[in-house]
Every structure is written in C-alpha cells, then in structure tokens.
Image: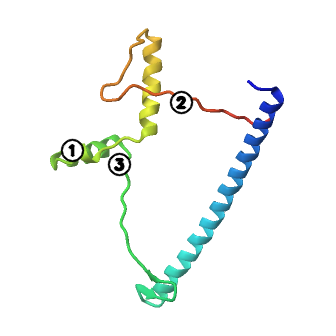
Amino acid sequence: MNTIVEFEQICEEIQKQREECDKVKQESKRVNEKLDELEKKALAMLETNEISSYAGKVGRISMQVRETVRVPQDPESREQFFAWLKDRGLFESTITVHSQTINSLYRREAEAAVEAGNLMFSIPGLGEPTRQQILSFRQK
C-alpha cells in the first residue's frame, strides 16, 4: 500500500463519486416522472379528440394498446402454465432463471454443502464459479 494519506484521499473520492451517482439517479428519476406525466397528457388528448395518431413537426405520436400478463404466482398456476408449455414443446426454450436467482441458489446450496463437509460441491449444468473482489463502503 502507498501511504495512509493517499488511501484516505481515495476513500474520500469514492464517497464523493457515490454522492454524485446518487444525485444523477435522483435527477434521472425526476426526468422520467416528468416524461411519464407528459405521455399521459398526450394519451388523454388523443383519446379526447378520438384519434389514434398524430403527425406533428417533431414526429408521429400514436396510441397503442399492449396486453401484458403476470407470471404465475402460486404453485398450482405455475404447474398449469409449465404443463401448457411442455404440451406445446415450448418449455425448454421459454423457461429461464434470472442470474441473481441462480447465484443466490448457488451460494445457499454451496454453504449447506460446506457445512455438511462436501468441499467438492457443484450444481450440474452450471460452470465453476468465478470470484471477483468488490469494494464495500459504508458511510460514517
């Protein structure tokens, strides 16, 4: 390590940069809220005037309807959905697991395996874990 003074300077810079990131996130949130507000106004104006699109100076704006569905929440619904996918041969190509879920599962299972004395733990189909050092910084 260089000197404590240099290390303290780096720590202070980290704190300043984190504060700057927080400010940018807040500004981004404010800007997105304003955009949502404007888009709601535009949709209301299209509906009021009973038109689905408008070509103006800056481009075309149009009202679209998009349907969305929720992921099955309870085990029974999930099994029904999975059976439906399997019947159509879509299960393997459709079902995915979020990487954070996989990592959480792996850590939990690896910890249990180590406690049970299994130091050669692995989950079939998953590669060897990689390790990355990260910095944890807690403000005073």
Which residue is outermost to the bottom? 49
Residue 54 sits above or below residue 134 on the image: below
Looking at the image, which residue is at 16% across and 47% down? 87
Number of dots carrying numbers: 3
Q: Nearer the viewer, residue 10 or 55?
A: 10
Kindly identify the amino acid type of the residue bearing the numbered disc 3: Pro
Q: Which residue is mark 1?
A: 83
Looking at the image, which residue is at 43% across and 10% down? 116
Assign the C terminus to one quadrant of the image: top right
C-alpha gap between disc 2 and disc 1: 39 Å
Please report contact status of discs 1 and 3: CB closer than 8 Å, yes or no. no
C-alpha gap between disc 2 and disc 3: 34 Å
- Relative to residue 38, is residue 9 drawn left or right? right
Position in image of residue 113 (x %, y %): 42, 16
Residue 50 sits above or below residue 132 on the image: below
| Disc 2 secondary structure class | loop
Q: Nearer the viewer, mark 2 or mark 3?
A: 2
Q: Which residue is mark 2?
A: 132
